[in-house]
Image (spheres, coloured by chain):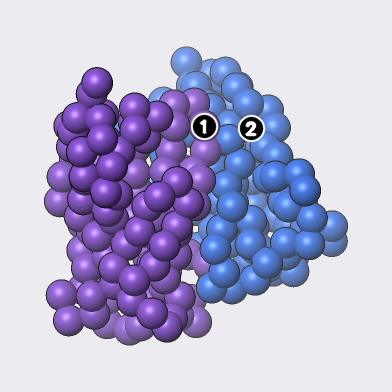
Amino acid sequence: AQSVTQLDSQVPVFEEAPVELRCNYSSSVSVYLFWYVQYPNQGLQLLLKYLSGSTLVKGINGFEAEFNKSQTSFHLRKPSVLISDTAEYFCAVSELRAGNMLTFGGGTRLMVKP
Amino acid sequence: KAGVTQTPRYLIKTRGQQVTLSCSPISGHRSVSWYQQTPGQGLQFLFEYFSETQRNKGNFPGRFSGRQFSNSRSEMNVSTLELGDSALYLCASATGPGQPQHFGDGTRLSIL
């Protein structure tokens, strides 16, 4: 069975500073990787996905992530954050040939301060 | 294109009752999955349906069940409600297996 660990439960950062949200996963088979964002009282919005190909993946709102197979990581980065990026971020994996069953990390609350 | 629609948005029930939640996927999406989100356990997979067949099931008791109709709309049912069933229930749809899932805004279920 796969598992996902988001190493930081909260990340405070000042506006316009860079940020990295860390995600490590464990799986015995190949996986698809996703980052989702959740704003208060809303569902999850897909930020980006890694299915195959280039290990550097660009998503919406200026976010990007890099898949590192040897370190089993999929860290999310943004070079300059905005106040509006304040939200909960979730890393998720699904195993190839396992349908759409997502396993989520515990989430990281990004708090952008002026 | 309309997104994933979940109804109702909020629901209050008492222990022992049963509840049915509804999910309308994005047009053309045949895969529908359900997740439970709580502060203590985080996001947990309940089950996935594809073309009216349950493909995967998470580690939840038999009180949790679901189904999918021929138009891909899905319902989940929880019987004999317990206080611990209070949660945000999220539905997600995708075009097929292994494809990115798009989530609805959820149904917030409160058990009194």
Callout 1: residue from which chain? A
Spot occupied by residue A106 in the image (x, y as percentages of width and height): 27, 46
**The quadrant where residue B7 appears:** top right
Q: Nearer the viewer, residue B61 or B33?
A: B33
Residue A72 placement, left or right of B52: left
Task: Please tell me how crowded label 2 is: few (under 14), some (14-19), or many (20+) other residues with Cα within 10 Å.
Answer: some
Relative vertical location of residue A81 with respect to residue B17 in this rendering, above or below: below
Callout 2: residue from which chain? B
Label 1 to label 2, Cα distance in Å?
21 Å
At 42% across and 83% down in the image, what residue appears? A53
Q: Which residue is labeled 2 in the image?
A: B19
Q: Are marks 1 and 2 on the same chain?
A: no
Q: Nearer the viewer, residue B93 or A83?
A: A83
Spot occupied by residue A92 in the image (x, y as percentages of width and height): 37, 59
Rendered hue of chain B is blue
Visible residue check, residue B18: no
Q: From the image, which quarter does the N terminus of chain A lie in?
A: bottom left
**Disc sitting over residue A90 in the figure:** none
Task: Please tell me how crowded label 1 is: few (under 14), some (14-19), or many (20+) other residues with Cα within 10 Å.
Answer: some
Residue B27 placement, left or right of A57: right
**Kind of element beneath mark 2:** strand
Q: Which residue is labeled 1 in the image?
A: A42
Spot occupied by residue A67 in the image (x, y as percentages of width and height): 29, 72
Spot the purple chain and give its letter.
A
Q: Amino acid at mark 2?
A: Val
**Kind of element beneath mark 1:** loop
Name the mark nearer the viewer: 1 or 2: 1
At 35% across and 58% down in the image, what residue appears? A64
Q: Amino acid at mark 1?
A: Gln
